Amino acid sequence: MSQAIEGLQPVIVWKYFADIARIPRCSKHEEAMTKYVLETAQRLGLKANTDKFGNVVVRKPASAGKERVRSIALQGHLDMVCEKNKDKAHNFARDPIELVRKGNVLMANGTTLGADNGIGVATNLAIMEDRSLVHGPLEFLFTVDEETGLTGASNLAPGMLESRTLMNLDSEEEGHIYVGCSGGRDTIGTWKASFESAPARTTGAVLKVTGLKGGHSGLEIDKGRGNAVKIINRVILQLAPLGARLASVDGGNKHNAIPREAEALLFLPGKRWEEAVAVVAQCNLVISAELGSVEPDLTITLGPTKKKGKVLAKPLQKRLCSTLAALPHGVTKMSADIPGLVETSTNVAVVRTEKKSVVVATSQRSSVASEIDEICQSVASVFDLGGAAVKGTDGYPGWKPNMNSEVLKLARSTYRQLFGKDPEVKAIHAGLECGIIGEKFPGMDMVSFGPTLDAVHSPDEKIYVDTVDRYWKFLLEILKNAQ
Protein backbone atom coordinates (compact mmCIF):
# COMPACT_ATOMS: atom_id res chain seq x y z
CA MET A 1 0.00 0.00 0.00
CA SER A 2 1.24 3.50 -0.83
CA GLN A 3 2.48 5.41 2.22
CA ALA A 4 0.60 8.46 0.94
CA ILE A 5 -2.78 6.90 1.81
CA GLU A 6 -1.87 5.36 5.19
CA GLY A 7 -4.43 6.28 7.83
CA LEU A 8 -6.91 7.82 5.38
CA GLN A 9 -10.62 7.09 5.72
CA PRO A 10 -12.48 5.24 4.35
CA VAL A 11 -9.71 2.66 4.09
CA ILE A 12 -11.45 0.54 1.47
CA VAL A 13 -11.91 3.47 -0.93
CA TRP A 14 -8.29 4.62 -0.65
CA LYS A 15 -7.07 1.05 -1.10
CA TYR A 16 -8.79 0.88 -4.47
CA PHE A 17 -7.66 4.40 -5.37
CA ALA A 18 -4.03 3.42 -4.82
CA ASP A 19 -4.54 0.26 -6.90
CA ILE A 20 -6.01 2.30 -9.75
CA ALA A 21 -3.06 4.72 -9.62
CA ARG A 22 -0.81 1.88 -10.77
CA ILE A 23 -2.90 1.07 -13.85
CA PRO A 24 -2.43 2.94 -17.18
CA ARG A 25 -5.71 4.58 -18.16
CA CYS A 26 -5.22 7.52 -20.49
CA SER A 27 -8.30 8.24 -22.56
CA LYS A 28 -8.77 5.68 -25.36
CA HIS A 29 -6.32 3.33 -23.61
CA GLU A 30 -8.40 1.96 -20.73
CA GLU A 31 -8.09 -1.73 -21.61
CA ALA A 32 -6.15 -2.54 -18.43
CA MET A 33 -8.77 -0.79 -16.31
CA THR A 34 -11.64 -2.60 -17.99
CA LYS A 35 -9.83 -5.87 -17.31
CA TYR A 36 -9.23 -4.87 -13.67
CA VAL A 37 -12.92 -4.08 -13.08
CA LEU A 38 -14.03 -7.36 -14.66
CA GLU A 39 -11.51 -9.33 -12.61
CA THR A 40 -12.61 -7.57 -9.44
CA ALA A 41 -16.25 -8.39 -10.16
CA GLN A 42 -15.34 -12.03 -10.77
CA ARG A 43 -13.34 -12.19 -7.53
CA LEU A 44 -16.32 -10.79 -5.62
CA GLY A 45 -18.77 -13.17 -7.28
CA LEU A 46 -20.72 -10.39 -9.03
CA LYS A 47 -22.21 -10.51 -12.51
CA ALA A 48 -20.64 -8.18 -15.07
CA ASN A 49 -21.29 -7.25 -18.69
CA THR A 50 -19.12 -5.29 -21.09
CA ASP A 51 -19.85 -3.85 -24.50
CA LYS A 52 -17.55 -3.64 -27.50
CA PHE A 53 -16.37 -0.15 -26.49
CA GLY A 54 -15.08 -1.32 -23.11
CA ASN A 55 -17.90 0.07 -20.93
CA VAL A 56 -18.67 -2.24 -18.01
CA VAL A 57 -21.79 -2.78 -15.89
CA VAL A 58 -21.52 -4.80 -12.67
CA ARG A 59 -24.63 -5.81 -10.71
CA LYS A 60 -24.82 -6.37 -6.96
CA PRO A 61 -27.98 -7.82 -5.38
CA ALA A 62 -29.82 -5.96 -2.64
CA SER A 63 -28.90 -6.50 0.98
CA ALA A 64 -31.37 -8.47 3.11
CA GLY A 65 -34.73 -6.71 3.41
CA LYS A 66 -34.05 -4.22 0.61
CA GLU A 67 -34.94 -6.43 -2.35
CA ARG A 68 -38.01 -4.36 -3.31
CA VAL A 69 -36.17 -1.03 -3.34
CA ARG A 70 -35.72 0.62 -6.75
CA SER A 71 -32.50 -0.26 -8.56
CA ILE A 72 -29.89 2.51 -8.55
CA ALA A 73 -26.94 2.89 -10.93
CA LEU A 74 -23.68 4.40 -9.65
CA GLN A 75 -21.55 5.76 -12.47
CA GLY A 76 -17.97 6.89 -13.04
CA HIS A 77 -15.48 6.89 -15.90
CA LEU A 78 -12.34 4.76 -16.18
CA ASP A 79 -10.10 7.14 -18.12
CA MET A 80 -8.05 10.12 -16.95
CA VAL A 81 -6.43 13.17 -18.52
CA CYS A 82 -2.71 12.39 -18.83
CA GLU A 83 -0.77 15.62 -18.36
CA LYS A 84 2.70 16.13 -16.91
CA ASN A 85 5.12 18.95 -16.33
CA LYS A 86 7.58 19.31 -19.18
CA ASP A 87 10.56 18.44 -16.99
CA LYS A 88 8.88 15.35 -15.51
CA ALA A 89 10.06 11.98 -16.86
CA HIS A 90 6.91 9.88 -16.88
CA ASN A 91 5.45 7.37 -19.33
CA PHE A 92 1.69 7.18 -18.78
CA ALA A 93 1.51 3.91 -20.73
CA ARG A 94 3.82 2.22 -18.23
CA ASP A 95 4.63 4.21 -15.10
CA PRO A 96 2.35 4.32 -12.03
CA ILE A 97 1.08 7.64 -10.74
CA GLU A 98 3.29 8.70 -7.81
CA LEU A 99 0.99 9.71 -4.94
CA VAL A 100 2.12 12.53 -2.66
CA ARG A 101 0.29 13.63 0.49
CA LYS A 102 0.62 17.14 1.91
CA GLY A 103 -1.56 17.43 4.99
CA ASN A 104 -5.18 17.33 3.88
CA VAL A 105 -4.27 17.21 0.19
CA LEU A 106 -3.36 14.25 -2.01
CA MET A 107 -1.52 15.06 -5.25
CA ALA A 108 0.73 13.38 -7.79
CA ASN A 109 4.41 14.01 -8.38
CA GLY A 110 4.55 16.18 -11.50
CA THR A 111 1.57 14.59 -13.28
CA THR A 112 -2.20 14.63 -13.16
CA LEU A 113 -3.50 12.64 -10.18
CA GLY A 114 -6.40 10.91 -11.92
CA ALA A 115 -8.82 11.60 -9.06
CA ASP A 116 -11.01 12.71 -11.95
CA ASN A 117 -12.58 10.15 -12.00
CA GLY A 118 -10.46 7.61 -10.14
CA ILE A 119 -12.19 8.48 -6.88
CA GLY A 120 -15.59 7.66 -8.38
CA VAL A 121 -14.29 4.35 -9.75
CA ALA A 122 -12.67 3.50 -6.40
CA THR A 123 -15.98 4.27 -4.67
CA ASN A 124 -17.85 1.87 -6.92
CA LEU A 125 -15.29 -0.88 -6.37
CA ALA A 126 -15.42 -0.36 -2.60
CA ILE A 127 -19.23 -0.65 -2.53
CA MET A 128 -19.01 -3.75 -4.72
CA GLU A 129 -16.72 -5.36 -2.12
CA ASP A 130 -18.30 -4.26 1.17
CA ARG A 131 -21.00 -6.79 2.09
CA SER A 132 -21.90 -4.98 5.33
CA LEU A 133 -23.63 -2.12 3.53
CA VAL A 134 -27.40 -1.63 3.41
CA HIS A 135 -28.78 -0.97 -0.07
CA GLY A 136 -31.25 -2.01 -2.72
CA PRO A 137 -30.26 -3.57 -6.07
CA LEU A 138 -27.24 -1.78 -7.51
CA GLU A 139 -25.70 -1.37 -10.94
CA PHE A 140 -22.18 0.00 -11.28
CA LEU A 141 -21.56 1.65 -14.63
CA PHE A 142 -17.92 2.20 -15.63
CA THR A 143 -17.60 4.15 -18.87
CA VAL A 144 -14.54 4.75 -21.07
CA ASP A 145 -13.14 7.74 -22.95
CA GLU A 146 -15.07 10.41 -21.07
CA GLU A 147 -12.32 13.00 -21.26
CA THR A 148 -11.98 13.18 -25.05
CA GLY A 149 -15.62 13.55 -26.01
CA LEU A 150 -17.67 11.25 -23.74
CA THR A 151 -17.58 8.63 -26.48
CA GLY A 152 -17.93 5.68 -24.10
CA ALA A 153 -21.28 6.93 -22.83
CA SER A 154 -22.26 7.93 -26.37
CA ASN A 155 -21.77 4.34 -27.53
CA LEU A 156 -23.26 2.64 -24.48
CA ALA A 157 -25.36 -0.31 -25.62
CA PRO A 158 -29.11 0.33 -25.09
CA GLY A 159 -29.66 -2.75 -22.93
CA MET A 160 -26.73 -2.21 -20.57
CA LEU A 161 -28.71 -0.51 -17.77
CA GLU A 162 -31.90 -1.63 -16.05
CA SER A 163 -31.99 1.17 -13.45
CA ARG A 164 -33.90 4.39 -14.03
CA THR A 165 -32.19 6.20 -11.16
CA LEU A 166 -28.53 7.15 -11.54
CA MET A 167 -25.97 8.86 -9.35
CA ASN A 168 -22.97 10.14 -11.26
CA LEU A 169 -19.85 10.31 -9.04
CA ASP A 170 -17.88 12.72 -11.20
CA SER A 171 -18.44 16.14 -9.60
CA GLU A 172 -15.78 18.02 -7.71
CA GLU A 173 -17.24 20.00 -4.79
CA GLU A 174 -18.34 18.15 -1.66
CA GLY A 175 -21.61 19.52 -0.33
CA HIS A 176 -22.82 20.40 -3.83
CA ILE A 177 -25.36 18.35 -5.77
CA TYR A 178 -25.39 18.88 -9.52
CA VAL A 179 -28.58 18.59 -11.52
CA GLY A 180 -27.52 19.96 -14.92
CA CYS A 181 -24.50 20.42 -17.16
CA SER A 182 -23.39 22.14 -20.35
CA GLY A 183 -23.11 20.60 -23.76
CA GLY A 184 -19.90 20.92 -25.70
CA ARG A 185 -18.32 20.91 -29.16
CA ASP A 186 -14.89 21.45 -30.68
CA THR A 187 -14.02 23.77 -33.57
CA ILE A 188 -10.71 23.16 -35.34
CA GLY A 189 -8.88 25.35 -37.84
CA THR A 190 -6.19 23.93 -40.15
CA TRP A 191 -3.81 25.71 -42.51
CA LYS A 192 -1.78 23.92 -45.14
CA ALA A 193 1.82 24.57 -44.13
CA SER A 194 4.10 26.42 -46.52
CA PHE A 195 7.75 26.93 -45.55
CA GLU A 196 10.69 28.92 -46.87
CA SER A 197 14.32 29.32 -45.92
CA ALA A 198 15.06 31.46 -42.90
CA PRO A 199 16.37 34.90 -43.92
CA ALA A 200 20.12 35.40 -44.00
CA ARG A 201 21.90 36.76 -40.92
CA THR A 202 19.20 35.61 -38.49
CA THR A 203 19.66 33.88 -35.17
CA GLY A 204 17.54 30.99 -33.94
CA ALA A 205 15.58 31.67 -30.75
CA VAL A 206 13.27 29.66 -28.53
CA LEU A 207 10.39 31.57 -26.96
CA LYS A 208 8.69 29.85 -24.03
CA VAL A 209 5.66 30.51 -21.84
CA THR A 210 5.68 28.39 -18.68
CA GLY A 211 4.39 28.35 -15.10
CA LEU A 212 0.67 28.78 -15.77
CA LYS A 213 -1.93 26.84 -13.78
CA GLY A 214 -4.00 25.62 -16.72
CA GLY A 215 -6.91 23.51 -15.56
CA HIS A 216 -10.30 22.32 -16.77
CA SER A 217 -11.63 24.38 -19.66
CA GLY A 218 -15.12 24.36 -18.13
CA LEU A 219 -14.67 24.41 -14.39
CA GLU A 220 -11.76 26.88 -14.36
CA ILE A 221 -12.68 29.00 -17.38
CA ASP A 222 -14.04 31.76 -15.11
CA LYS A 223 -10.97 31.94 -12.86
CA GLY A 224 -9.10 34.42 -15.04
CA ARG A 225 -6.15 32.09 -15.61
CA GLY A 226 -3.65 32.73 -18.35
CA ASN A 227 -3.77 30.91 -21.67
CA ALA A 228 -0.27 29.99 -22.86
CA VAL A 229 -1.27 29.89 -26.54
CA LYS A 230 -2.81 33.36 -26.43
CA ILE A 231 0.13 34.75 -24.46
CA ILE A 232 2.87 33.35 -26.71
CA ASN A 233 1.05 34.62 -29.79
CA ARG A 234 0.82 38.06 -28.20
CA VAL A 235 4.61 38.09 -27.71
CA ILE A 236 5.24 36.84 -31.27
CA LEU A 237 3.16 39.74 -32.58
CA GLN A 238 5.28 42.14 -30.50
CA LEU A 239 8.44 40.64 -32.02
CA ALA A 240 7.18 40.71 -35.61
CA PRO A 241 8.09 44.40 -36.22
CA LEU A 242 11.70 43.48 -35.40
CA GLY A 243 11.68 41.01 -38.29
CA ALA A 244 10.96 37.86 -36.25
CA ARG A 245 10.06 34.91 -38.46
CA LEU A 246 8.12 32.01 -37.05
CA ALA A 247 9.29 28.45 -37.72
CA SER A 248 6.91 26.63 -35.36
CA VAL A 249 4.59 27.24 -32.43
CA ASP A 250 3.21 24.54 -30.17
CA GLY A 251 1.13 24.78 -27.02
CA GLY A 252 -1.55 22.94 -25.09
CA ASN A 253 -2.32 19.23 -25.21
CA LYS A 254 -6.02 18.62 -24.64
CA HIS A 255 -9.16 20.20 -26.05
CA ASN A 256 -10.67 20.32 -22.56
CA ALA A 257 -7.70 21.87 -20.76
CA ILE A 258 -6.59 25.51 -20.60
CA PRO A 259 -3.04 25.44 -22.06
CA ARG A 260 -0.33 25.85 -19.40
CA GLU A 261 2.78 25.94 -21.59
CA ALA A 262 3.72 26.97 -25.12
CA GLU A 263 6.93 27.13 -27.14
CA ALA A 264 7.87 28.78 -30.43
CA LEU A 265 10.96 28.56 -32.63
CA LEU A 266 11.79 31.93 -34.15
CA PHE A 267 14.52 33.39 -36.33
CA LEU A 268 15.54 36.96 -35.46
CA PRO A 269 17.86 39.39 -37.23
CA GLY A 270 21.14 39.19 -35.31
CA LYS A 271 21.50 42.96 -35.10
CA ARG A 272 18.12 43.25 -33.33
CA TRP A 273 18.68 40.54 -30.73
CA GLU A 274 19.01 42.92 -27.79
CA GLU A 275 15.80 44.70 -28.80
CA ALA A 276 13.99 41.36 -28.90
CA VAL A 277 15.24 40.45 -25.43
CA ALA A 278 13.96 43.81 -24.16
CA VAL A 279 10.56 43.27 -25.81
CA VAL A 280 10.17 39.87 -24.14
CA ALA A 281 11.24 41.28 -20.77
CA GLN A 282 8.62 44.02 -21.10
CA CYS A 283 5.94 41.48 -22.09
CA ASN A 284 6.88 39.48 -19.01
CA LEU A 285 6.33 42.51 -16.78
CA VAL A 286 3.13 43.67 -18.44
CA ILE A 287 1.36 40.31 -18.70
CA SER A 288 2.43 39.25 -15.19
CA ALA A 289 0.97 42.50 -13.88
CA GLU A 290 -2.28 41.89 -15.78
CA LEU A 291 -2.71 38.39 -14.37
CA GLY A 292 -1.67 39.51 -10.91
CA SER A 293 -2.00 36.95 -8.15
CA VAL A 294 -3.89 34.49 -10.39
CA GLU A 295 -0.69 33.35 -12.16
CA PRO A 296 2.24 34.14 -9.83
CA ASP A 297 4.58 31.67 -11.58
CA LEU A 298 4.12 32.90 -15.16
CA THR A 299 7.46 33.10 -16.96
CA ILE A 300 8.16 34.23 -20.53
CA THR A 301 11.70 33.54 -21.77
CA LEU A 302 13.67 34.03 -24.97
CA GLY A 303 16.91 32.17 -25.49
CA PRO A 304 19.27 31.45 -28.40
CA THR A 305 19.34 28.06 -30.08
CA LYS A 306 21.51 26.40 -32.68
CA LYS A 307 18.50 24.75 -34.26
CA LYS A 308 18.27 25.13 -38.02
CA GLY A 309 15.17 25.00 -40.10
CA LYS A 310 12.73 26.73 -42.35
CA VAL A 311 10.18 29.35 -41.40
CA LEU A 312 6.51 29.66 -42.22
CA ALA A 313 5.84 31.70 -45.33
CA LYS A 314 5.16 35.31 -44.40
CA PRO A 315 1.48 35.32 -45.44
CA LEU A 316 0.85 32.16 -43.39
CA GLN A 317 2.61 33.57 -40.34
CA LYS A 318 0.45 36.68 -40.53
CA ARG A 319 -2.80 34.76 -41.00
CA LEU A 320 -2.01 32.34 -38.16
CA CYS A 321 -0.98 35.01 -35.66
CA SER A 322 -3.87 37.30 -36.56
CA THR A 323 -6.33 34.43 -36.16
CA LEU A 324 -4.92 33.43 -32.76
CA ALA A 325 -5.17 37.05 -31.64
CA ALA A 326 -8.78 37.33 -32.83
CA LEU A 327 -10.05 34.02 -31.44
CA PRO A 328 -12.17 34.59 -28.33
CA HIS A 329 -11.15 32.81 -25.14
CA GLY A 330 -12.98 32.63 -21.82
CA VAL A 331 -16.49 33.31 -20.57
CA THR A 332 -18.85 34.85 -23.13
CA LYS A 333 -22.04 34.78 -21.04
CA MET A 334 -23.11 34.12 -17.44
CA SER A 335 -26.45 32.52 -16.61
CA ALA A 336 -29.28 34.88 -15.79
CA ASP A 337 -31.16 32.09 -13.99
CA ILE A 338 -28.51 30.41 -11.80
CA PRO A 339 -26.23 32.89 -9.96
CA GLY A 340 -22.54 32.27 -10.55
CA LEU A 341 -23.05 29.74 -13.36
CA VAL A 342 -21.08 30.21 -16.55
CA GLU A 343 -23.60 29.73 -19.35
CA THR A 344 -21.35 29.93 -22.43
CA SER A 345 -17.58 29.87 -22.94
CA THR A 346 -14.85 29.05 -25.42
CA ASN A 347 -11.29 27.79 -24.95
CA VAL A 348 -8.32 28.23 -27.31
CA ALA A 349 -6.88 24.85 -26.43
CA VAL A 350 -4.09 23.65 -28.72
CA VAL A 351 -1.79 24.90 -31.46
CA ARG A 352 0.42 22.45 -33.34
CA THR A 353 2.92 22.99 -36.16
CA GLU A 354 3.20 19.81 -38.18
CA LYS A 355 5.13 18.86 -41.30
CA LYS A 356 2.27 19.64 -43.64
CA SER A 357 -0.12 21.74 -41.58
CA VAL A 358 -0.67 24.10 -38.68
CA VAL A 359 -3.63 23.16 -36.49
CA VAL A 360 -5.49 25.16 -33.85
CA ALA A 361 -8.09 23.35 -31.72
CA THR A 362 -10.73 25.14 -29.67
CA SER A 363 -13.63 23.95 -27.51
CA GLN A 364 -17.00 25.57 -26.84
CA ARG A 365 -19.47 24.92 -24.02
CA SER A 366 -22.97 26.10 -23.19
CA SER A 367 -26.02 24.94 -21.27
CA VAL A 368 -28.19 26.57 -23.96
CA ALA A 369 -28.26 24.77 -27.31
CA SER A 370 -28.78 27.92 -29.38
CA GLU A 371 -25.87 29.66 -27.66
CA ILE A 372 -23.44 26.85 -28.40
CA ASP A 373 -24.50 27.16 -32.04
CA GLU A 374 -23.74 30.89 -31.90
CA ILE A 375 -20.31 30.67 -30.22
CA CYS A 376 -19.23 27.84 -32.54
CA GLN A 377 -20.29 29.97 -35.50
CA SER A 378 -18.25 32.91 -34.15
CA VAL A 379 -15.11 30.81 -33.74
CA ALA A 380 -15.57 29.19 -37.14
CA SER A 381 -15.96 32.63 -38.72
CA VAL A 382 -12.65 33.79 -37.24
CA PHE A 383 -10.93 30.71 -38.66
CA ASP A 384 -12.60 31.26 -42.02
CA LEU A 385 -11.51 34.91 -42.18
CA GLY A 386 -7.97 33.75 -41.33
CA GLY A 387 -7.94 31.38 -44.29
CA ALA A 388 -8.12 28.14 -42.31
CA ALA A 389 -10.11 25.05 -43.24
CA VAL A 390 -12.72 24.65 -40.50
CA LYS A 391 -14.01 21.44 -38.95
CA GLY A 392 -16.54 21.10 -36.14
CA THR A 393 -17.35 18.07 -34.01
CA ASP A 394 -20.84 16.80 -33.21
CA GLY A 395 -20.15 17.21 -29.50
CA TYR A 396 -22.41 16.05 -26.70
CA PRO A 397 -25.75 17.19 -25.25
CA GLY A 398 -26.35 19.15 -22.09
CA TRP A 399 -28.44 17.97 -19.15
CA LYS A 400 -31.49 20.07 -18.27
CA PRO A 401 -32.10 20.45 -14.52
CA ASN A 402 -35.18 18.76 -13.02
CA MET A 403 -35.82 20.39 -9.66
CA ASN A 404 -38.68 17.92 -8.98
CA SER A 405 -36.38 14.90 -9.25
CA GLU A 406 -37.07 12.14 -6.72
CA VAL A 407 -33.40 11.27 -6.30
CA LEU A 408 -32.63 14.96 -5.75
CA LYS A 409 -35.23 15.11 -2.98
CA LEU A 410 -33.68 11.99 -1.40
CA ALA A 411 -30.16 13.38 -1.66
CA ARG A 412 -31.12 16.76 -0.18
CA SER A 413 -32.96 15.29 2.79
CA THR A 414 -30.15 12.81 3.43
CA TYR A 415 -27.49 15.52 3.41
CA ARG A 416 -29.54 17.65 5.81
CA GLN A 417 -30.04 14.65 8.11
CA LEU A 418 -26.31 13.84 8.16
CA PHE A 419 -24.71 17.26 8.34
CA GLY A 420 -27.41 19.57 9.70
CA LYS A 421 -27.44 21.89 6.69
CA ASP A 422 -28.72 21.96 3.14
CA PRO A 423 -26.44 21.08 0.24
CA GLU A 424 -26.02 23.52 -2.63
CA VAL A 425 -27.94 22.44 -5.72
CA LYS A 426 -26.19 23.58 -8.88
CA ALA A 427 -25.57 23.08 -12.56
CA ILE A 428 -22.00 22.70 -13.83
CA HIS A 429 -20.23 24.33 -16.76
CA ALA A 430 -18.68 21.08 -17.91
CA GLY A 431 -19.77 18.00 -19.77
CA LEU A 432 -21.13 15.23 -17.59
CA GLU A 433 -22.12 11.87 -18.96
CA CYS A 434 -25.56 12.42 -17.45
CA GLY A 435 -26.56 14.41 -20.54
CA ILE A 436 -25.82 11.49 -22.84
CA ILE A 437 -27.14 8.80 -20.49
CA GLY A 438 -30.37 10.74 -20.03
CA GLU A 439 -30.77 10.95 -23.80
CA LYS A 440 -30.09 7.22 -24.24
CA PHE A 441 -32.33 6.12 -21.36
CA PRO A 442 -35.44 8.33 -21.35
CA GLY A 443 -36.87 8.96 -17.90
CA MET A 444 -33.54 8.46 -16.11
CA ASP A 445 -33.64 10.37 -12.80
CA MET A 446 -30.14 11.68 -12.06
CA VAL A 447 -27.91 13.67 -9.73
CA SER A 448 -24.14 14.11 -9.65
CA PHE A 449 -21.85 14.69 -6.66
CA GLY A 450 -18.38 13.89 -5.35
CA PRO A 451 -15.59 14.98 -3.00
CA THR A 452 -13.65 18.22 -3.50
CA LEU A 453 -11.01 18.28 -6.24
CA ASP A 454 -9.02 21.19 -7.58
CA ALA A 455 -6.97 21.94 -10.73
CA VAL A 456 -8.15 18.81 -12.52
CA HIS A 457 -6.63 18.13 -15.96
CA SER A 458 -3.33 19.65 -14.79
CA PRO A 459 -0.30 18.40 -12.81
CA ASP A 460 -1.56 20.57 -9.93
CA GLU A 461 -4.64 18.34 -9.58
CA LYS A 462 -5.45 17.60 -5.95
CA ILE A 463 -8.12 15.95 -3.83
CA TYR A 464 -9.00 17.09 -0.31
CA VAL A 465 -8.92 13.91 1.73
CA ASP A 466 -11.34 14.98 4.48
CA THR A 467 -14.09 15.52 1.90
CA VAL A 468 -13.81 11.92 0.70
CA ASP A 469 -15.00 10.56 4.04
CA ARG A 470 -18.00 12.93 4.09
CA TYR A 471 -18.87 12.09 0.48
CA TRP A 472 -18.62 8.36 1.26
CA LYS A 473 -20.94 8.61 4.28
CA PHE A 474 -23.39 10.70 2.25
CA LEU A 475 -23.54 8.17 -0.58
CA LEU A 476 -23.99 5.20 1.73
CA GLU A 477 -26.77 6.96 3.62
CA ILE A 478 -28.61 7.71 0.36
CA LEU A 479 -28.42 4.02 -0.56
CA LYS A 480 -29.66 3.09 2.92
CA ASN A 481 -32.58 5.57 2.76
CA ALA A 482 -33.69 4.74 -0.78
CA GLN A 483 -37.21 3.33 -1.04
Image (cartoon, rainbow, N blue to C red):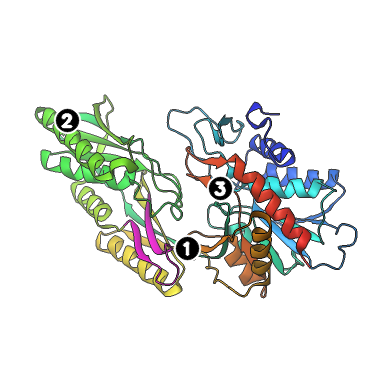
Which region of the structure is painted magenta?
Answer: 329-349
Residue occupied by mark 1:
184
Badge 3: how crowded within 10 Å, few (<14), some, or many (20+)?
A: many
Q: Amino acid at mark 1?
A: Gly
Residue closer to the observer: 30 or 374: 374
SS label for mark 1: strand
- Judged from this view, the residue extending furthest toward the right is 64
| Residue 308 % position (x, y) | 27, 29
Q: Is residue 347 magenta?
A: yes
Residue 289, label in figure = none
Left/right of residue 149 with respect to residue 297 in the rendered view: right
Q: Which numbered disc flags the more N-terminal residue, 3 or 2?
A: 2
Magenta: main secondary structure: strand
Among the 4 quarters of the image, the one containing residue 68: bottom right
Q: Amino acid at mark 3?
A: Thr
Q: Residue at x 45, y 62 (%)?
A: 185
CB atoms of marks 1 and 3 within 8 Å: no
> What is the spatial separation of the Cα atoms under label 1 and label 2, in whole angstroms?
40 Å
Residue 452, label in figure = 3
Badge 1: how crowded within 10 Å, few (<14), some, or many (20+)?
A: many
- Judged from this view, the residue extending furthest toward the left is 271
Among the 4 quarters of the image, the one containing residue 389: bottom left
Residue 277, label in figure = 2
Q: Is residue 442 magenta?
A: no
> What is the spatial separation of the Cα atoms under label 1 and label 3, in whole angstroms?
23 Å
| Residue 332 % position (x, y) | 34, 63
Quadrant, the C terminus = bottom right
